[in-house]
Amino acid sequence: MSLAEHREALRRYRILETFEAGLALTGHEAKSARRGTVSLKGSFVVLRGEQPMLINAHIGSFQPKNAPSGYDPRRARPLLLHKKEVQRLLGKRAGEGLTLVPLRLYTRSGRIKVEVGLARSKSKADQREAIQAREAEREIRRLVRGKV
């Protein structure tokens, strides 16, 4: 079940490869995420040492009036990956100038997971080209249905 998606990432980046990572959350954050008070807009993944961290993802408090003191909804949250996956990400990202972006937050077997994409930034021309292709496809579908 999908809890949140980062649609902007699909427009701005060309996704080359995806990984599934666990997300280390506190109890009230997990409850809040399952409720759907999550936003991945503007979030990204960085590697601090060998620990991947989800930065700037907003997870609101479960009960705002009863939130822990000093709770920061945009705090850095560690991602849980195997050591071999982290080493692979380090090698690919450093060699080719790639970026790690969170694509969606979802649950699997009762655990909250993040789909992380290894991506390359699209140029403005690529973005315009994608928009033109989408509009052309929409126009073709409209003509096939018989509505001009």
Image: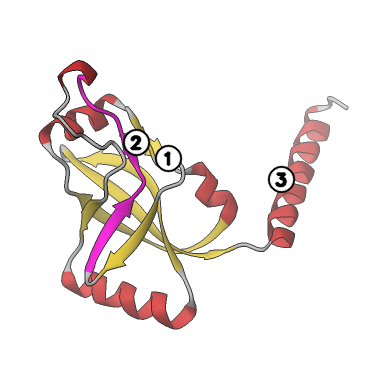
Mark with earlier residue (2, 3): 2
Please rate how many residues cluster around mark 2, counting C-alpha atoms within 10 Å: few if below 14, some from 14 to 19, many from 20.
some
Q: Secondary structure at mark 2?
A: strand
Circle 1 or circle 3, nearest the eye: 1
| Amino acid type of the residue that numbered disc 3 sits on in the rendered structure | Arg
- Count every numbered label the image shows and give the total: 3
Q: Secondary structure at mark 1?
A: strand
| Amino acid type of the residue that numbered disc 2 sits on in the rendered structure | Ser
| Amino acid type of the residue that numbered disc 1 sits on in the rendered structure | Glu
Seen from this angle, which residue lies furthest top?
A: 65
Which quadrant of the figure has residue 52?
A: bottom left
- Looking at this view, is 88 or 140 the one in front? 88
Please rate how many residues cluster around mark 3, counting C-alpha atoms within 10 Å: few if below 14, some from 14 to 19, many from 20.
few
Which quadrant of the figure has residue 44?
A: bottom left
Q: Mark 1 highlights which residue? A: 5
Q: Mark 2 highlights which residue? A: 2
Residue at (88, 27) in percent of width and height: 148
In percent of width and height, residue 3 lies at 33, 34
Residue at (48, 75) in percent of width and height: 97
The quadrant the N terminus occupies is top left
